[in-house]
Image (cartoon, rainbow, N blue to C red):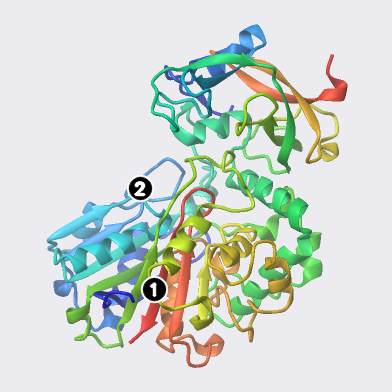
Amino acid sequence: MRPLPELTPENTAFWTGGERGELMIAFCGDCSKAVHPPQLLCPACQSQAVTPRAVAGTGTVYSFTVNHQPWLPDMKVPFAIAVVDLNDAPGVRVTAPVLTDDPDTVRIGQAMTIAFEASGDVWLPLWKPTEQAA
Amino acid sequence: MSAPPRAAITGVGMSDIGRNTGRPAMLHLAEAADRALARAGLTRADIDGIATYPGKADNSPGMSPLGTGEVRGALGLKTRWHSAVPDGPAQMAPIMVAAMAVMTGQARHVLCFRALTESSSQSAGRRASIAGAGKAQIGGWLSWLVPVGAMSASNWAGWIANRYFHEFGMTREHLGMVAVAERQFAQMNPMAVMQKPLTMEDYLAARMISSPLGLFDCDIPIDGAAVVIVSAADAARDCRLPPLSIEAMGSALQSPETWDQRADLTTMGAHDAGADLWARTSLKPADVDVLGLYDGFSIFVPLWLEALGFCGHGEAKDFIAEGNIAPGGRFPVNTGGGQLSGGRLHGFGLLHEVCLQLWGEAGARQVPGASTGVCGMGGGFIAGAMLLNRT
């Protein structure tokens, strides 16, 4: 069992939005900058009006890796982890495992759609190749 | 252009490092300290400062078993200044703060140390190098990696490598050249843990860890310790060896504390620190004779080469293929075998080797006449760089 994220006031929306199927990203209410990882202050304008909102949950693979080494006794390998540029949150990437039968098919530039799996008190993001999405 | 150097490295020492030594960290540390003091021509009574990275920590098994307090106690040191730096310019941080301590008169001779028992911890069933292993929850920057399956730094370095491959046409063979060159150096260093020959065929046939990084792209957990003594310039003159002046330090950091949000992941914090280093000296990369570049994973070596301006962005694959970093090359890198073949002393081993080279003590692998060396430590968002000059 891998560790789960510690929930904070800033990150709770991100880690629990999956309950509603929503990818929650923080944005500055004053200058509209996407702020990820979420934090109390906008790094661009120092506004404290940084609040999460649901984004489309689609993006493009910026990079990836296929993990072959079982780091934990219960870890099933191989699996791909993708670093995905979000389509509607400029400058923000979300890193998550890829839901696919063949991790070797993951490519830079591939379109992805978010999914979630519940674990403990959080909903962990997963990326699904968009052409396979329902 | 630069201010007169006021801090210098006067001694380095490394314990008999090994895999699964079963030897307590403190005994490794004491051996490294004895060797560093002997090299410097100093005694324990001369040491009036102590510094380490990161301090005693158990966030990853065997990663940092000793703090400054225990080491002061074990070595019987009476210090006027001490510091443990978990949050600084990578593993270079204690060397840098020690330099600042001697430059401001807080201490005369600072014993900087790094001790690890990751090999024994791993053999005891506690997976080394996995942050948060065994914990239920994790916070900070690791919380954006570990819970989504990116438990190992090999994953983080893997996606950096894949993006770099994609943009610049690097292949696994280029990283193999790094691993093979470091093994060739290791075979000339009796202290290195890996002594068997490594061919490109061996490299390519090894099992994958996290694509595109395979077994020989990953450094080797060991048990061991290294000590670096940083001295005030006037005190350094009394030491046995010519002082290695700290000509410049670079620790700029411009991207957020993450492994996935830096706008261009074919660069790292190293690029910020590297540019900062050269802004503080009149020396140029062409003046450098020997390099120690952080190689927790092989991909960090080409990125550090570019970060420090030894070649342009995207040019490292050709720079490596031309033989520049290998034995006999113009810019030999990690001449002790690096962490890939020497063992993971978290940057301290790389600095130890650069210092040996500048003192002409590197045996069969000695770079003739080496007088200027550069060392870059860290991967991802943390980095520290240092330029040393034998005076």
Label 2 and label 1: CA atoms lie apart by 27 Å
Q: Are marks 2 and 1 in contact (CB under 8 Å)?
A: no
As drawn, A119 above or below B150? above
Q: Tell me the quarter of the image containing the N terminus of chain B.
A: bottom left
Q: Earlier in the sequence, mark 2 or mark 1?
A: 2
As drawn, A65 above or below B89? above
The image quadrant that residue B315 belongs to is: bottom right
What kind of residue is marked 1?
Thr
- Chain letter for mark 1, please: B
- Chain letter for mark 2, please: B
Q: Nearer the viewer, mark 2 or mark 1?
A: 1
In the image, residue B23 lies at what x, y percent?
Answer: 41, 60
Mark 1 = which residue? B281
Q: Does mark 1 fall on the same chain as mark 2? A: yes
- Pick out the residue farthest to the front: A31
In the image, residue B214 lies at what x, y percent?
Answer: 72, 55
Q: Which mark is residue B86?
A: 2
Residue B252 in view in this figure? yes
> Residue A39 or B136: which is nearer the viewer?
A39
Residue B16 in view in this figure? no
- Determine crowd level at label 1: few under 14, some 14-19, many 20+ residues with C-alpha closer than 10 A: some
Q: Tell me the quarter of the image containing the C terminus of chain B.
A: bottom left
Q: Secondary structure at mark 2?
A: loop
What kind of residue is marked 2?
Pro
Please indicate whether residue B325 sits to the left or right of residue B254 in the image: right
